[in-house]
Amino acid sequence: MDDDGAQFGKVAARIPARRTVEALDRLIGLYQAERSAGETATAFFRRVDLERARAILRDLEDITPRDA
């Protein structure tokens, strides 16, 4: 919660738990590559297009028998 009130996230992908580290690495990379000078991660992820985040995570959603 901040001065703008409560904020809730949006689902960008549904991935197996064992791929969480890779997903976070990709999201952090997106933030580092596309943030504005001085922009916080919170501000960046509020502004970034949800489809952009979905696109970089899409291939992690496929569940194989190994992931189940």
Image (tube, helix red, strand yellow):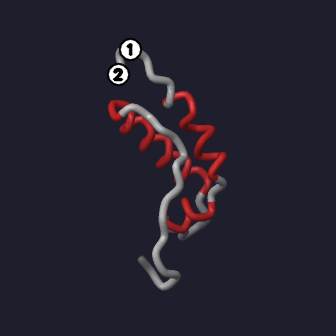
Comparing 24 with 2, the one in front is: 2
Q: Amino acid at mark 1?
A: Pro
Q: Dot 2: few (<14), some (14–19), or many (≥20) neighbours within 10 Å?
A: few
Q: Quadrant where the N terminus lies? A: bottom left
Q: Residue at x 49, y 59 (%)?
A: 9
Q: Is residue 58 left or right of residue 20?
A: right
Q: Do the residues under discs 2 and 1 have CB atoms within 8 angstroms?
A: yes
Comparing 24 with 6, the one in front is: 6
Establish if 32 lies above or below 24.
below
> Which residue in the structure is indicated by mark 1?
65
Q: Residue at x 59, y 46 (%)?
A: 53
Q: Position of residue 64 (x, y in %)?
A: 43, 17
Q: Is residue 65 left or right of residue 4?
A: left
Callout 2: SS: loop
> Which residue in the structure is indicated by mark 2?
68
Q: Is residue 9 left or right of residue 55?
A: left
Q: Amino acid at mark 2?
A: Ala
Q: Quadrant where the C terminus lies? A: top left
Callout 1: SS: loop
Q: CA distance from mark 2 to mark 1?
A: 5 Å
In the displayed image of the protein, which residue is found farthest to the top? 65
Report the disc number at residue 41.
none
Q: Position of residue 60 (x, y in %)?
A: 49, 30
Q: Position of residue 26 (x, y in %)?
A: 49, 41
